[in-house]
Image: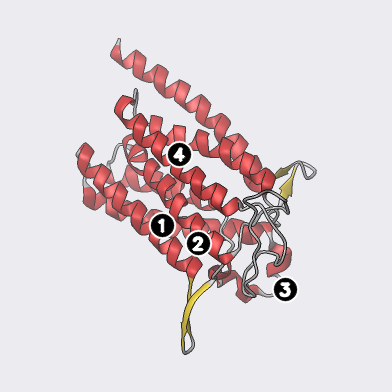
Amino acid sequence: MHPVLFHIGPFTLHTYGVFVAMAFLSAIGLALKEARRVGEDTNKILDLCFYVLIAAIVGSRVLYVFINWQVFRQDPVEIIRIWHGGLVFYGGFIAACLTAVWYTRKEGLFSWKTADILAPSVAFGQFVGRIGCFFAGCCYGKPCELPWAITFTHPDSLAPKGMPLHPTQIYSSVNGLVIFVVLVSLKRVKAFEGQLFWMYVLLYGVSRSIIEIFRGDERGMLVDGLFSTSQFIGVLMAAVALVMMIVLRARDVRGQL
């Protein structure tokens, strides 16, 4: 793959960073389009996206550093080199959700409606952003002999070189696209506010836990090595999503009686 697009003197443009930027921009564009469709204040949604963006980057990096602290304690400067990979989605997701709760309450937005506006955009952003992981070689898979296995050869790739691996970055990218399509389809028959958001949490939690089985990079293990950190969080979040959808649906039914 091509971790670096080009060099201009001391400046290096990393492919990973370009795709992460494209992911955020495309997600924001979709969120604003949806906000206009449902009659929400686009200026407030744009401001929310800015705060969520910062929180997501910081939160995802903080969790990655926490999981791999033994590595970073040897070279603390590496903490700021996010172009080398190393953003744990659930760290950013949790930080972004907390930030969104704070902002929606401050601005008087209806939280679940706003969450439904953003949910498909997050899935689409993952579709785009994971392509950057593929180019960088981070989030790589375990060795395999499948016909679609990928062998990384670029010297700057973060993945092991010269061996066929599960293209888990592509699995994750396609997974984001599939979830996006499901959520967009669900908009037409949505039964209650918050349904799209919690359906995203459920679908991503389950699918991410499955994809983690094929991951080969070091990402922290919990419960005596039974789960990776993201897998453990994903299972918990999926369970919470199921409960929340039942609760919100029941509340909506009671409100209609």
Rounded to the nearest angstrom, the CA distance separating label 4 from label 1 is 15 Å
User: What residue does disc 2 label?
Assistant: 132
Question: What crowding class fits label 4: few (fewer than 14 Cα within 10 Å), some (14-19), or many (20 or more)?
Answer: many
Query: Of the numbered discs in the image, which one, if any, rests on residue 74?
Result: 3
Tell me the amino acid under the disc marked 2.
Gly
Query: Of the numbered discs in the image, which one, if any, rests on residue 23?
Result: 1
Question: Which residue is located at x 40 percent, y 43 percent?
Answer: 101
User: What residue does disc 4 label?
Assistant: 179
Tell me the amino acid under the disc marked 4.
Ile
What is the quadrant of the N terminus in the image? bottom right
Foreground disc of the pair 1, 3:
1
Above or below 64: residue 99 = above
Rounded to the nearest angstrom, the CA distance separating label 2 from label 3 is 26 Å
Foreground disc of the pair 3, 4:
4
Tell me the amino acid under the disc marked 1.
Ala
Residue 19 position, x and y percent, is: 44, 62
Query: Of the numbered discs in the image, which one, if any, rests on residue 127?
Result: none
Tell me the amino acid under the disc marked 3.
Gln
Question: What crowding class fits label 2: few (fewer than 14 Cα within 10 Å), some (14-19), or many (20 or more)?
Answer: many
Rounded to the nearest angstrom, the CA distance separating label 1 from label 2 is 9 Å
Question: What crowding class fits label 3: few (fewer than 14 Cα within 10 Å), some (14-19), or many (20 or more)?
Answer: few
N-terminal of the two: label 2 or label 4?
A: 2
N-terminal of the two: label 4 or label 1?
A: 1
Above or below 111: residue 192 = above
Question: Which residue is located at x 61 percent, y 51 percent?
Answer: 168
Label 3, secondary structure: give it: loop
Label 1, secondary structure: give it: helix
Which residue is the extreme one toward the bottom?
Answer: 9
User: CB under 8 Å between callouts 2 and 3?
Assistant: no
Residue 200 position, x and y percent, is: 46, 37
Q: Nearer the viewer, residue 179 or 45?
A: 179
User: CB under 8 Å between callouts 1 and 2?
Assistant: yes
